[in-house]
Image (cartoon, rainbow, N blue to C red):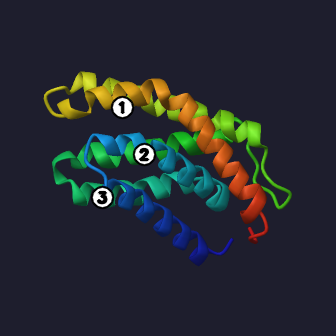
């Protein structure tokens, strides 16, 4: 895939992650992790090795500019989530081809990565409760709903890829 198209995908998906944060109030925006998961899964299929990490970085930086009180947490969370998605897609050997992508492998990779980032974010709220008190209850939900949300996001991403996006030249 051409570098310009990769850059466009990273900017577009990172901006969509930011927009979902911008219009939803603070603790509830964490429930939109499914949107992030679909975008990160598709970005790692399009851009390959570190696509989700790049998208997470763009989304995290834009979100931190919108909510400056949590700058380090917004950036670290988004970049880490992208890196975990990239790593889990690699570990589960998910391959994006013109024939399609294995739905079960992508669902497992996304369930694992969403579970892991859910527990990491829950752990962060227990370590820094004075800074991010409002997020504690929501992060508990994200931590336990992570695998289901990730599996649904993996299914959605594989459906989109297999149905509409596989014909885009890689």
Q: Distance between the residues labelled 1 and 3?
A: 20 Å
Q: Helix, strand or loop at disc 2?
A: helix
Q: How far apart are marks 3 and 2 (CA)?
A: 12 Å
From the image, tell me which residue sits under label 3: 22
| Between discs 1 and 3, the one toward the N terminus | 3
Q: Which residue is drawn at 60% across and 75% down?
A: 5
Position of residue 105 relative to residue 29, above or below, is: above
Task: Decide which of 96, 153 is in the foreground and name it.
Answer: 153
Q: Which residue is drawn at 56% across and 29% down?
A: 147
Side of 138 where 16 appears, left or right: right
Q: How crowded is mark 2: few (under 14 residues within 10 Å), some or many (20 or more)?
A: some
| Between discs 3 and 2, the one toward the N terminus | 3
Which residue lies most toward the left here? 130
Task: Decide which of 7, 66 is in the foreground and name it.
Answer: 66
Q: Distance between the residues labelled 2 and 1?
A: 14 Å
Label 2 vs label 1, nearer the camera: 2
From the image, tell me which residue sits under label 2: 32
Q: Residue at x 26, y 54 (%)?
A: 64
- Residue 110 visible at all: no
Q: Residues within 10 Å of mark 3 (few under 14, many from 20)?
A: some
Say which quarter of the image contains residue 119.
Answer: top left
Q: Helix, strand or loop at disc 3?
A: helix
Give x and y (percent) for residue 21.
33, 54
The circle drawn on residue 121 is: 1
Give x and y (percent) for residue 93.
74, 40
In the rendered image, the quadrant that contains the N terminus is bottom right
Position of residue 5 relative to residue 22, above or below, is: below
Q: Helix, strand or loop at disc 1?
A: helix
Say which quarter of the image contains residue 32.
Answer: top left
């Amino acid at each position: 895939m051409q570098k310009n198209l990769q850059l466009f995908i990273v900017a577009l998906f990172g901006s969509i992650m930011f927009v979902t944060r911008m219009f939803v109030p603070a603790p509830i925006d964490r429930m939109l992790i499914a949107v992030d998961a679909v975008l990160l899964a598709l970005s790692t299929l399009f851009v390959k090795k570190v696509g989700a990490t790049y998208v997470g970085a763009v989304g995290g930086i834009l979100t931190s500019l919108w909510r400056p009180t949590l700058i380090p947490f917004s950036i670290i969370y988004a970049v880490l989530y992208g890196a975990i998605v990239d790593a889990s897609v690699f570990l589960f050997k998910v391959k994006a081809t013109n024939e399609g992508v294995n739905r079960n492998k992508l669902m497992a990779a996304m369930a694992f990565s969403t579970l892991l980032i859910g527990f990491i974010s829950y752990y962060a709220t227990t370590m820094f409760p004075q800074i991010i008190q409002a997020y504690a209850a929501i992060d508990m939900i994200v931590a336990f709903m992570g695998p289901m949300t990730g599996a649904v996001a993996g299914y959605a991403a594989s459906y989109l890829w297999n149905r509409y996006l596989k014909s885009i030249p890689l």
